[in-house]
Image (cartoon, grey):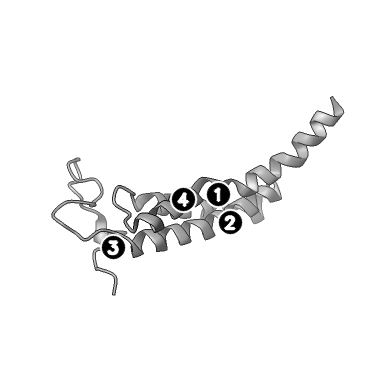
Amino acid sequence: MGILNTLISSFAPIFLILSPLTSYTDQIVSIHRTRTSAGFSLDIPLIMLTASILKIFYWPGARYDLSLLVQAVIMVGVQVVLLKVALDNRPGWRGDGGVPFVGGQAKGWRPWGFWRWRTQRL
């Protein structure tokens, strides 16, 4: 039982630290290969960046496990790369295509046009 406990306590932090890379690398490569981010919601990087940044700022007061802090830092980097690749390869604005929340109650409206990324890449 001691060897199993040692293996789990050794590999679990490594798995946690590498999980952002294993989770989002496939999406980044797929968008880069197909040269389009059609069907990918830009809300995902927004949510993950917000959560990871809050987790980083929470760490000095809570002092949770260091592997979770490293995971949050790596997640910020991965999400910035994902956002860059998605924005570089986004399809043009044709009508309501690619606009988040179209058809719902909000009808694509967001306060101050936040996180809309309307202008085409220069």
* Marks 4 and 3, the one that precedes in the sequence: 4
Screen quadrant of the N terminus: top right
Question: 48 or 81: nearer the eye?
Answer: 81
Q: State the CA–CA distance, disc 3 to disc 1.
A: 24 Å
In the rendered structure, which amino acid carries the disc numbered 1?
A: Pro
Q: Secondary structure at mark 4?
A: helix
Relative image position of residue 53 (x, y in whole percent): 52, 56
For mark 1, what is the residue? Answer: 20
In the rendered structure, which amino acid carries the disc numbered 2?
A: Ile
Horizontal side of 20 relative to 97 (left or right) equals right
Screen quadrant of the C terminus: bottom left
Query: Which residue sits at x=47%, y=55%?
Result: 49
* Marks 3 and 2, the one that precedes in the sequence: 2
For mark 2, what is the residue? Answer: 74
For mark 3, what is the residue? Answer: 117
Q: Secondary structure at mark 1?
A: helix
In the rendered structure, which amino acid carries the disc numbered 4?
A: Met
Q: What is the number of callouts on the image?
A: 4
Q: Nearer the viewer, mark 2 or mark 4?
A: 2
Mark 1 touching mark 2, by CB under 8 A? yes
* Marks 4 and 1, the one that precedes in the sequence: 1
Residue placed furthest toward the left? 95
Relative image position of residue 75 (x, y in whole percent): 54, 54
